[in-house]
Each structure stands twice: as structure tokens, then as C-alpha cells.
Amino acid sequence: MLRSKALAIFRTLSGRYDDTPGPRHFIPFSSPFQALIGTMLSAQTTDRAVNGIVEDLFSAYPTPEALAGAPVGDLENRIRSIGLYRTKARNIRATAWKLVEEYGGEVPRTMEELITLPGVGRKTANIVLSHAFGIDTGIAVDTHVARVSRRIGFTGEISADAIEQDLMALFPAECWGDINYVLIRHGRAICRARKPRCPECPVREDCRYYHETFQPDSG
């Protein structure tokens, strides 16, 4: 896809979902530490589920130092309502410990450092860098971003890393910080995994999936 066409699609979607003032993120936070832990907890879990536990978690363990010393059993109990809670409890505790021991209790500001933290991959690191520090060195690719990007025709890749590289090549860097938010919103509202609402989609005429599915003879 040409960059000009991709940008036109992105502008249309941005206008469609430019209805929420303030920061474009789905899990509230008041510090880089909270942004990191909240994003780690959100993997394979709904934002609503995470938002239901973070206030209690950060009330009990408000700093990396406190979280590093938390009993794993207590962490498991506090986050039991979300998916993979046992693994996540171990990872957030180990990450807090590493923040204290290696980074003076501060969340690092580089991709290279963030992905050394237990349970942190490129998606989490991209979100933390963008939301907590305003640094956009890449694009966070979750299931919504991957699905919407493939359907529209921004990429033909399957893996998150390959999709990220295609999106970074297609869009200028000044767009990277908003792509995750906009495509997630579109994936939740219209371009759903099951029964996408293609007739209601504002970019359907430029969407590969729409033409292949609804207008197979359009050329």
C-alpha cells in the first residue's frame, strides 16, 4: 500500500475516534512505574479487568521497592481475577526487584533496557515508552492492531514484530504514538474478530478485506 493511501485511512480513523480528550491510553496511571506494571498485567486480559485490580495493587505496593518485597502469594491473590495471574505475579515482582537493583527504582527509558525486564517484550516496552515518556521508537502491536492492519492491507505479515516493521515503514514517525490507540478503537468498535461491521466502516472502500469479502468481483 502507498504511504499516501495509508495516511488517508489513518486520518479518517483518527477523526472517527478523536472523541476522548486527554491521553490516549486505556489503563490509567500516575507514574512510569504504574504504567509499566499495568501494561504487564494487561497481556491477554481485558483493560476492564486490569482497571479493576490496579488501585488495590498500588495501594498495597506503591513503589518498586515495596513490590519487590511483596510475597508472591499475596500478589497472586490480588490479581487472581486476570489471566495468567501466577506468571504475572512472578514477573511483576521480579521486574520490580530489577528496577530497584539495576535502575535505582526508576523505569528505564530505552527499548533495549525495558525488554531485559522479566515479562516485558516489545509491545509492552513500546506502550510504556510512548505513554509514560512520550518516546515513540516503535509501534505496539496487539491482537487488534495486528488484525486491523492485515485486513485493511497495511501488512501481510503474521508475527507482531514483522507487522510492527511494516507499519513503521509505512507511516512517518510522528504517527507512531497514535497508531496503537486508533487501531485498537477501530478493532473494538467496527473491525471485530468475529462479525466485523464492514458496512459501517468509514474506510471500507480502501480496505482489502472489505473488497475481498463483499465485492470479490470489483477487481
Image (cartoon, rainbow, N blue to C red):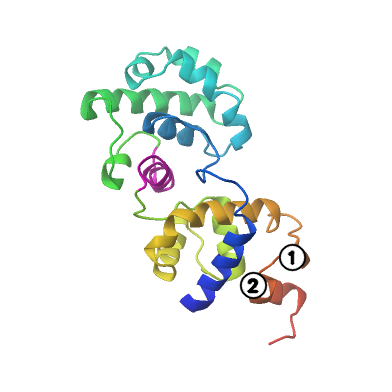
Q: Which disc number belongs to residue 207?
A: 2
Residue 82 appears in the figure = no
Q: Which residues are magenta?
A: 120-134
Magenta span contains residue 189:
no
Q: CA distance from mark 1 to mark 2?
A: 9 Å
Closer to us: 51 or 192: 51
Residue 125 is covered by the magenta coloring: yes
Question: Farthest front residue?
Answer: 21
> As displayed, is residue 82 above or below residue 180?
above
Q: Residue furthest bottom?
A: 219
Q: Which mark is residue 185?
A: none
Residue shown at 46%/35% (left/top)? 40
The answer to whether mark 1 and mark 2 are in CB contact below 8 A is yes
Q: Is residue 211 left or right of residue 126?
A: right
**Which residue shows up at 46% across the image and 13% down it?**
60
Label 2 neighbourhood size at 10 Å, few (<14), some (14-19), many (20+)? many
Residue 113 in the image, given as x and y percentages of width and height: 26, 41
Residue drawn where x is 49% and y is 77% of the image = 4
